[in-house]
Image: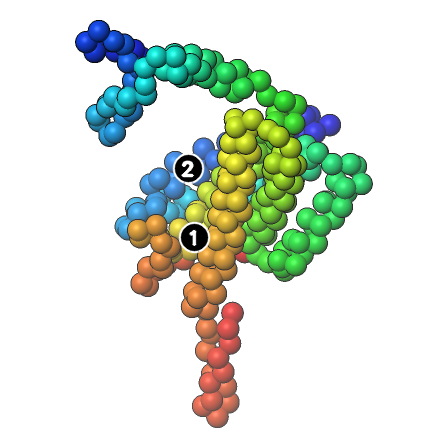
Amino acid sequence: MGWEQRGNNSYYYKKEREGSKVKSVYVGRGEIAHMVAEIQSRSPLLEKMARTFRSPDQIKLEESEAALERVTNLIQLITQAALLTAGFHTHKRQWRRKRNARSYCGTD
Amino acid sequence: MREAIAGPINAKADQIRAKFQSLLDKTNKENPRQQDVKALSDLLVGNKSLDLWRSVASAGYLAELIVIDNARATAAMKECWKQRLQSLKRELGADDAPLLEQLLIQQAALCWLKLNLVEIGYSNAMSQSITLTLGMYWEKRLSAAQRRFTRACESLTRVRKLSRNSPPLQVNIAAEGGQQVNVLA
């Protein structure tokens, strides 16, 4: 993002990525372009400050989410293990039972 | 109190996860090696099976405590949530379900509770004038809670469906007069 000199004037462009290519998008020139440039130069800093500051409520929310995520992952693993040992397998993310599958255990 | 029990429970849960993950990577394929499946089976229903289920259930119970304790609500409200959580588990058939289904019911109930709490927080946040960053933060939290709840319900349904569709073990007993009695085990 920045000012580019074209002829005798400076124009403000912003850069946008499209896949592997980066293209310049014209924003403007003059006073408005200066304002836009100033706001955009500050916004990453504001974003960073907002991300760094977390309220006590947010900390609690994230703590409970982490606990929930941990137990969810564990139960998903156990479920997969139980299904695999019961003679199932995944085919294109779908659980299927093998023909004449030999069950190694029950789930109860 | 919670911090004192959280450490050992989390450590045990991490240990179980590491063991299962390595075996699952080997067995979740079309034709896994029989010894890997056997090892997974031993881990699941071996001598320490009760210990395993108890550890996972403890991790779930700890998560329940953390989620309820951290909720922004009065003590009375938290008690109501606890009771509602228990009754939801009963409604989902936790009392008579096999061990695996009990865990999945616990997970679904917990995710349901979390989704409700996040929805309350989201509504509170949206009723005020908030920054774009905070709005996005709540959107993200809500989407994650909804995704987690959907996934938990899907897992429970899948396991119930698969266990229902598995052919039950049938025992044929010859009775007098050449009649045959079929008994489902």
Q: Position of A11 compared to A34: left or right?
A: left
Q: Quadrant of residue A50?
A: top right
Q: Amino acid at mark 1?
A: Leu
Percent of width and height locating residue B176 = 50, 89
Colour basis = rainbow
Q: CA distance from mark 2 to mark 1?
A: 14 Å
Q: Residue at x 56, y 26 (%)?
A: B131
**Looking at this rendering, what residue extends furthest in the top direction?**
A8
Q: Secondary structure at mark 2?
A: helix
Q: Amino acid at mark 2?
A: Gln
Q: How many discs appear?
A: 2
Q: Secondary structure at mark 1?
A: helix
| Residue B61 versus residue A103 in the image, above or below | above
Crowdedness near tag 2: few (<14), some (14–19) or many (≥20) residues, C-alpha within 10 Å: some
Percent of width and height locating residue A77 = 46, 42
Residue A83's tag is 1
Q: The disc numbered 1 marks a residue on which chain? A: A
Q: Position of B75 compared to B142: left or right?
A: right
Visible residue check, residue A59: yes
Q: Residue at x 63, y 56 (%)?
A: B94
**Looking at this rendering, what residue extends furthest in the left direction?**
A7
Percent of width and height locating residue A2 = 31, 12
Visible residue check, residue B11: no
Q: Residue at x 69, y 25 (%)?
A: B4
| Residue B113 versus residue A106 in the image, above or below | above
Q: Residue at x 48, y 52 (%)?
A: B155
Residue B21's tag is 2
Along the line of sight, which residue is nearer the eye, B83 or B165?
B83
Q: Do dots 2 and 1 share one subunit?
A: no
Crowdedness near tag 1: few (<14), some (14–19) or many (≥20) residues, C-alpha within 10 Å: many
**Looking at this rendering, what residue extends furthest in the right direction?**
B76
